[in-house]
Amino acid sequence: MKKTLLFVGFCVALLTYAQPKKPNIVFIMSDDHAVSAVSAYQDWLAELAPTPNIDRIAKEGMLMHATYNTNSICGPSRAAILTGKYSHINGFFKNEKGGDFDASQQTFPKLLQKAGYQTAVIGKWHLGTAPTGFDYSKVMVNHGGQGTYFNTVFVENGKDTIVETERHSTAQVAHDALKWLTNKRDKSKPFMLMYQFKAPHRPWTPNPKFNDIYNEDFPHHETFNDDYKGRLAASQNMLEIENHMNRKDLKVPPPTNLKPWQVGEYYRYGNNGEFWTPNDTLQGAALKNWKYQRYIKDYLRCVAGVDEAVGQMLDFLEENNLDKNTIVIYTSDQGFYLGEHGWFDKRWMYEPSFRMPFMIKYPNKIKAGTHNKELLLNIDFAPTLLDLAGVNIPHDIQGESFKPQLFGDNYQGRDAVYYHYYEYPFWHKVQPHYGVSTGKFKLIHYYYDMDEWELFDLEHDKNEIDNLYGKCGYEEITTALKQKIKALQVQYKDDMSLEEMRAMTDMVVERVYSENKE
């Protein structure tokens, strides 16, 4: 009897030893961080505004060069990341008048939690409903769910409201994440932490400790003075640095004699194209450059704060011997315009907002310093994380795991990615559109109150200036891309009529937190 018990005990121990230890996961996400403002990508701002700590993840792992989102706006992108499903499937397709995220549905944190992971989310959430699928949550809830850079209001575990007055929001999120890892996690379980910043979202208010960096003027992007010729939808925007930035964006203080309601009006002035200048002598191109310099410097100072916080996390993992078995990801909910086409904000299917930064490290699994140029989507994040954790991927997830690409295994990559944006006219009058990109060509259809198409040759026109739609010699590629759009719409169950798509834009469902304070 004693021998039998010893044998059974030996077998259990051997089985336990043989099972690989599940990796921890730290999913770091900023808000509106453009690829061009991550120096690992060696884009046009790389030498002027380096991000050494974020770059560490790429140097120690893999840098993905062609990661795209399915709907370039904060809440919908986050919903797509959580669910692995397009906006029309997960139900959260616009921030403005689109209701709140259905927190009862399946998400990858819930699936990891069921598989034995301890899960946490700290920082920006912006989905209205309280986080579900997390053992611990502390998320921003003020300013329409956007959070603020100072005096940030958080809700902890869905019930306790906490106003943080000591730190800038980026530093506060960093502090809370390390505090959870140190004092609150169950060290007997693998963990998945979503570590999420408000920065560098509008109004780009940096931690004062970074106010003295970037004192020299930045160059303009080569499309800074784009005239939008041949692109009707682009010409009707409301996100021009020259015409649509307000006084709050550019930190112009109000007169001291204004009443509180007048201060709000003063700060919002400029949103709708109202002309203003800080002084009467500043006009024309000089005024546009002044606005740009104020904007880009504060934006990049906010990025510097995020980079510092990422470094603190990486150092903590190393110092506590957690780095070897922890997957670390850095990404953003979408890209952003830093003067390209004369713009700020996102929403368009053009590359600066369509494309997202994404890098991942997993020591001894993902080879350091590697690069991947395959087409990826933000709906792929959920199945990939489940796959890396050894959790079965539900059949209803629309994204695809790119784990084989990370490990150098055989795989068949995508030949195209599909995009669909719905929100109009607030905040920036970007026409609803859908489209497809193969990485070589991109076809976009604007359909709400116009019927306009755009075709770009991305290999020869990386800035998407020359609309080739309808031009001689491009009939064959246009037909092929329209067929690809149809096929992907069927595949992703987005093959509704234009009337049904317009109805989604027109839908009015109030959110828990008003978005009228942007």
Image (spheres, rainbow, N blue to C red):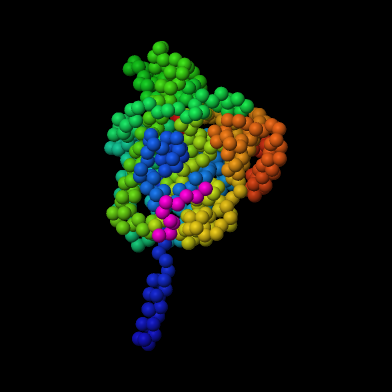
Judge whether 223 appears above or below 491 on screen: above
**Image quarter of the N terminus:** bottom left
**Image quarter of the C terminus:** top left
Q: Residue at x 71, y 37 (%)?
A: 475
Left or right of 59, for residue 387: right
Q: Which residue is drawn at 29% across and 56% down?
A: 320
The stretch drawn in magenta includes residue 477:
no
Q: Position of residue 140 (x, y in %)?
A: 39, 40
Q: Which residue is drawn at 58% across and 36% down?
A: 460
User: Quarter of the image holding residue 457?
Assistant: top right
Left or right of 181, for residue 370: right
Residue 95 in sight in this render: no
Considering depth in this image, is 152 or 227 the residue closer to the camera? Answer: 227
Q: Where is residue 178 in the image (x, y as percent from the top left)?
A: 32, 49
Q: How many marks?
A: 0
User: Quarter of the image holding residue 210?
Assistant: top left
Q: Where is residue 13 in the image (x, y as percent from the top left)?
A: 38, 75
Give the magenta-colored segment's residue range. 364-373
Considering depth in this image, is 163 or 325 the residue closer to the camera? Answer: 325
User: Quarter of the image holding residue 301?
Assistant: top left
**Prevailing SS of the magenta stretch:** loop
Residue 371 in sight in this render: yes
Q: Where is residue 302 in the image (x, y as percent from the top left)?
A: 37, 35
The stretch drawn in magenta includes residue 368:
yes
Q: Which residue is drawn at 48% across and 58% down?
A: 407
Considering depth in this image, is 402 or 475 the residue closer to the camera? Answer: 475
